[in-house]
Image (spheres, rainbow, N blue to C red):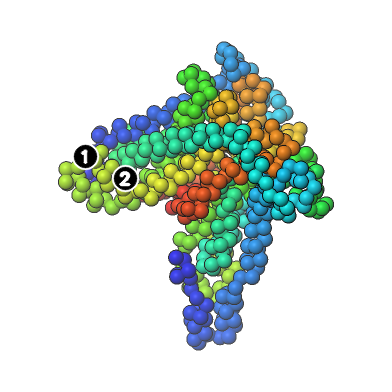
Amino acid sequence: MSTSTQLPAPAATAGPGAGRPAPTRRRAVSAERPNYLAGVAGWIWLAIIIVPVYWIVITSFKAQSSYFRTNPMAPPAEPTLANYRLVIESGFLRYFLNSVIITVGTTVPAVLVSFMAAFAIVRGGQGRFLRVVNGVFLMGLAIPLQATIIPVYLIIIRLHLYDSLLALILPSIAFAIPLTVLILGNFIRDVPKELFESMRLDGATEWGTMWRLAFPLTRPALVTVSIYQALTVWNAFLLPLVLTQSPELRVLPLALWTFQGQYTINIPAVLASVVLTTLPILALYIIGRRQLLSGLAAGFTK
Amino acid sequence: MTSAVGGGQRSLGWLVLPALLFFAAFGILPLLAVVALSFTSWDGLGEIMPAGLDSWTSVLADPGLPHALWVTFLIMALSWLVQTPVSILIGTFLARGHRYRAFLAVLYFLPLLLSSAAIAIAYKALLDPNFGLGAGLGVPWLVQNWLGEPVLALGTVVFVVSWQFIPFHSLVYQSAVRQIPVSLYEAARIDGAGRVRQFFAITLPQLKYTLITSSTLMVVGSLTFFDLIFVLTAGGPADATRALAVDMYLRGFRGNLMGPASVIATILVLVGLALALALRRLGGKDPTASQLEGA
């Protein structure tokens, strides 16, 4: 869409060319030359990004025996799926399921309660109570919440939730709330005031207005913020490391870490586990790249 | 309008309660408790005993604390210095036109799909001096003990952090650059401003608020780099990459000294708050705050 607004080269030359002295014209022309320097830098950066990714993928298809003997950048002469089989047999389907449970179990409630809070703050923000609550959430944005891991651990023990998936879900919901409220609030604020007014005149309650008006109108933001929070939970490492210990409760990042601890020298298998755990996100990236990217940058770009 | 909103006030307050409850239980309460725990002694399993200032005096006298602060600061400053210019350039590069750049963008954002744990594990294997990329390619310069030498290990952490997060910040800058009105560039071009001039006279000033947002995320975020450092180096070699968050974890959950670990956590919170406030002041007004005031 930006291509259409991009000024094509001839249009710009026409302006200064009309009656200006020659030097200006030359400079104007030089500005539209393809930016070779940026192009070259762009491809160099691509190499920095892509070489490790390429190496991870090809190595994951190499047999452990051939790994040490072959050129690391050459594709495998005899590709094998043995590494992937080893990873799957090591319980990764279970870990995958655990990750799905905590991701869905965190994202859905977190976004729903945050939406309700954002709606209340936007619609009733003049009240002192809601102002204070809003201030508390804003303060939450500035605090590195991982620093509270020790008391969170204590609270989880006292609630007898240690070593359960719920122990991961509850703090994750709390950690997600400040940013989600902020982002959704910004979007609810964009809903034209007249719509709220006409709903009110039609006798709708605030509760009805929230679900029938604000919710559908902020759906893109809800999707975006859900993606962001889901990825955050999906990739989380510290909470599972501290709050669970049973092997059957491992989530993917933690499973990756223990797996590489077990198979230190089987690098192809370790990399196969890296590829396998990234596949679901990669699939999302291929299906809905735009949604996923706007989800990643949620709220930071508005 | 105010009166209409005012009428709904009392009935609206309860809508924030579920969110507030969660945040109070697992956000605010832990925040207060971490300060309280710093005045106790606890091994993580047994009784929590009051210990007065013991943890504070022991941590503040420990040369490990200034070291951890220094490592945290180094990682923060260096990764900011690397990430910010590169992200701004990439964001600007990707923002406008050119089909090949759209193609590059698809690949540029790939690191966003990987978890910190996955990235750290992959780099650990990639940088292995005996079996990694350097040895295989026969490039002597690449064959170094990247994670085994203190200075190299810190540099490696900064590189991997940048590799992981530059895509995110480029994405942020890309959408910010796209919001700069094209007419500004048209006007500049008519006035004869070249590409470099346009970048410094239009793009950079227009990115001011994005720069503050992005820097805040980088700086406050760097305080909590735990996953990456822990998996990559576990704070080593010999504490060379033992940043505050890693130090907190190792003292608390490996050393079973929750009191001193809570002292470190309290320091982390204070440093984070101070930095966020300082950055907000630096930028005049934080963009998120100004949006809220516009309500």
When the figure is inspected, residue A246 is found, relative to residue B219, above or below; the finding is: above
Chain to which mark 2 belongs: A
Counting residues from the start of the chain, the first of labels 1 and 2 encountered is: 1
Residue B86, position in %: x, y? 62, 56
**Amino acid type shown at disc 2:** Phe
Whether residue A66 sits left or right of residue A229 in the image: it is right
CB under 8 Å between discs 1 and 2:
no
Question: Depth check: A207 or B266 in front?
Answer: A207
Q: Residue at x 58, y 74 (%)?
A: A31
Q: Which residue is mark 1?
A: A205
When the figure is inspected, residue A281 is found, relative to residue A240, above or below; the finding is: below
Label disc, if present, on residue A215 of the rendered structure: 2
Question: Depth check: B129 or B37 in front?
Answer: B129
Question: In this rendering, does residue B218 appear at all?
Answer: no
Q: Quadrant of the N terminus of chain A?
A: bottom left
**Amino acid type shown at disc 1:** Thr
**SS for dot 1:** loop
Question: Depth check: B254 or A50 in front?
Answer: A50
